[in-house]
Amino acid sequence: MDKQSLLMRLFYNDRGGSLLLGLLGVAIVLVPLLNLAVPEASMLHLSTYTVTLLGKYLTYALLALALDLVWGYCGILSLGHGAFFALGGYAMGMYLMRQIGERGVYGNADLPDFMVFLNWQELPWYWLGFDMFWFAMLMVVLVPGALAFVFGWLAFRSRVTGVYLSIMTQALTFALLLAFFRNEMGFGGNNGLTDFKDILGFDLQSDATRAGLFVASALALALGYLLCRYIVDSKFGRVVVAIRDAESRARFIGYRVERFKLGVFVISAVLAGIAGALYVPQVGIINPGEFSPLNSIEMVIWVAVGGRGTLYGAVMGALIVNYGKTYLTGALPEVWLFALGALFVLVTLFLPRGIVGLLNRKRADA
Amino acid sequence: MDPHQNIAVRHARRRYWPAPAILWSLITVVALWSFPAYSIEELDAAASASDISIEPPAIPAAATAFPETASASESVLDAAPLDFSASVQALNAANFDAKEQAINTLVALGDERTRAVLRALADGNLQYRKSDDKVVIVAEAADGYQLTDPLTDSDLGRVDKRDVKKISINNRLRIVLREAIARLSLSSQRVDVRLTAVEELTGNLDEAGVTLLESARINETDKDVVAAMDTALALPKLNAGDSAVQLRAIEDLQGSLLPVVRNQLTALAESTTADAAVRAAAKRAVASIQGELQFYALTETIFFGLSLGSVLLLAGIGLAITFGVMGVINMAHGELIMLGAYTTYLVQQAMPQYLEYSMLVAVPAAFLVSGLFGIAIERGVIRFLYGRPLETLLATFGISLMLQQLVRTTISAQNVTVANPEWMSGSWQINAALSLTYNRLYIVIFTLVIFGALQLLLKKSSLGLHVRAVAQNRPMARAMGIRTEWVDALTFGLGSGIAGVAGVALSQLTNVGPNMGQSYIIDSFMVVVFGGVGNLWGTLVGAFSLGVANKFLEPYSGAVLAKILVLVFIILFIQKRPRGLFPQQGRGAEN
């Protein structure tokens, strides 16, 4: 089967997905154009701030996609996906840290500023290799993947399911939060990693780099979407859905349930790690706050708002909720937590299938 | 609806109501029961033992506590009524010699009030009123000084600080005073005063002190005071030239846990001038002291562990009901704890002059506030989500965010300070090496009492019976005429109310702020999951073992790493035993 027909088959029944990819394609062309080519005085000009904000939303969308893959299709409600996101982010942050070189405040070519500040004499072994981009990218994929593999292997093998698993994932990210707060860990402690200068030789402050990062995020989201769509439409994906709906039955039929679960969980964690790696250069900092259980659970609400088990719903939910967050925290900071809390309650009570479910019902009624 | 069912419903309703009332009254009884333990005498004893500056108000308590003393001093007053008051007035003499004379006269008179006067003089709290030169005892007050008459101990009202002047003393007088106070204290009627006086003398005895102590020892009757005196007297002999004296002193000092004793023994063991036998004996004594200290350190660690465990248990016990018995994931549990802590704060704000009794009000108030919030949450949200645990988790998490913001907007985004009542501050000094802080001690006891009350409620009351019935088989319970909806609401209210009570206790230990709930939610879930869902005893064992394990790890790994290790341990433990330490037995367990 050639590539063309595979794509055709993927989108045969996926109007939401086609729309999403179309919009992403338009954004990839239009956003850098409006930012770089259109003069600043023009009405149509997009400020670099907006471009970065949009890029950040797209990384969140990729994260939501990863979460939807495990929650919507496999029924694993992970409250610890922020951990994978943050680990990917830390791997990228370590690369960016090494790129600073002698331009740090202390001018030490070998050691990042915070290590000089802590009087460390040499780079810890786990920082070695992070001055190479390819190695850092490998770690972006490997570290979250390995953590998900170990955790998932232990959890699924002993059949920890449902709420127990959710609490365990939350404990996981909580433990990492505490660990990364420690200065002795060698990841910058409370302050995390920041003050980045450039990535692959491009200045992180320049408009062109920002636009480039936006394009990279959009591409990653598009590819991530295609991958997820491919997975859920494959035979593997069908088994995963079967496990979600009737785990014992799938096991009795003869499927090794834990292997399927583990596979989905690891893929999802890797996607989350990539999202984190794209997130860090755009916001310019990574600190242990990203591990906070609140962050992880906020991601769940993006997916719930959009509609789980649809993939594009998760993307939509991430964009809508985060736009709302940016707007409310700016305009009415007091209201944001009320709004977010109310969103949790209202969506679970009245919109169990999210906005996508609402639209589908409207369409079915009409 | 048929009439029979109606009757059953009415029956059921009538039977439910007493249940929360039982728990509430139990809690109140417990709180009342714990109060007599801090009677005025003990408070005063603790105060005078720990803090000299609270001395002046101690006089009336001493007088009421020891009526025979009061009459004794009256007879002295009768014999020489002018002398005491005249001598006190003479303390305000122009020159220091006259003051010393006055002090000596006062000591010779042996009046029970003298000690307070001399202490006040030593602390600079004995002053004279500029208007009529009357000598008074002052205490810091909000706007100036609170004056007390040293003669009659009556209140002389409040004055501006400029209306009185301090009676000055010099270094020589300070030494005289110290000795005079020690002498008076050693002959005091109260054991604790004598003991404190001996302890203050230990390690800095001069020749006069030795004679003083030796003469006091002859008449001493209390065993503890005699032992303390022996220690104090033996200590200077360690440096005697005669090795026989030294050996005897070492023998006397065996078993003393005072740091000064250990330091001097260590110095002797390492000294080059002392005899070999003396050095060996000193080394043995140090080793035995070291062993004893280790034992007490172990005891202390266990106590800290139990204290942490009781905090975990308090936080987890409400969750053990809502999660363990009802199967409801309540992520707002931590916020219900927070509401309890804030209720304590508001109660204290409402009755600032009755701080000592604020806990009595706060415990039922917090139970009610959190319980009502819990019932509202159950009726408003959770009941629509039964059977959908993941959705329940999300919805209650939303509620937790709203509750946090509610506190931030209505009270403050900053932490608030909740005061410790007098009887909860300070510590119980068991010996020189071991002291247990009262607030932790009481919280351990309080937790166990709450736990017991809850067990009773669940095992012996009709509400408990219905709760267990609904938890085991909802349709069957309903078929038997139990109003499951009522049971759900009350159970959830009960679990939430206990979270509120936990908040009252935690407000005495940690910071109270809008985020405090979040730090307990994961811990509480861990405790419940570790102990085994649906099993209160499991929660108890789980909480205490995790608390103790945490405190034993801390010295080796640091507090944060200990916590991480415990979390990782639980994650691994759940792999081996997914249903916790004490899994639920029977049919209900399969769901």
Image (tube, grey):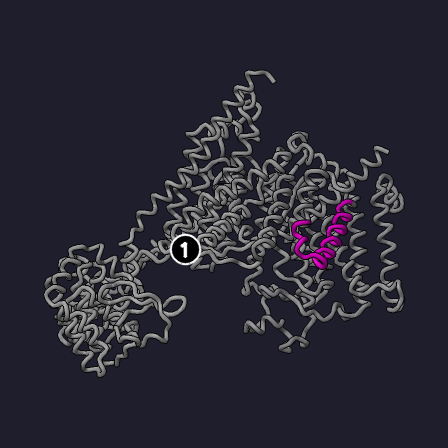
Q: In the image shown, does B493 or B137 lie closer to the viewer?
A: B137
Residue B77 occupies quadrant:
bottom left
The residue singled out by tag 1 in the image is B353
B239 sits to left or right of B470: left
Instruction: Name the image quarter holding the C terminus of chain B.
Output: top right
Residue at 68%, 59% in the rendered image = A89
Magenta segment includes A336 = yes
Majority secondary structure in the magenta region? helix
Q: Residues within 10 Å of mark 1 (few under 14, many from 20)?
A: few
Magenta segment includes B463 = no
Q: In the image shown, does A186 or A346 lie closer to the viewer?
A: A346
Chain letter of the residue beneath label 1 in the structure image = B
Q: How far from the left and from the top, in percent, is residue B171?
A: 25, 80
Is residue B252 among what the camera can see? no
Stretch of the chain drawn in magenta: A313-339
Instruction: Name the image quarter holding the N terminus of chain B.
Output: top right
Q: In the image shown, does A231 or B172 lie closer to the viewer?
A: B172
Q: How far from the left and from the top, in percent, is residue B468?
A: 49, 29
Residue at 53%, 48% in the rendered image = B339
> For the residue labelled by badge 1, is the local secondary structure a helix, a strand or a loop?
helix
Measured along the vertical axis of the image, is residue A62 above or below residue A117? above
Residue at 23%, 82% in the rendered image = B94
Is residue B24 among what the camera can see? yes
Q: How far from the left and from the top, in percent, is residue A195?
A: 68, 70
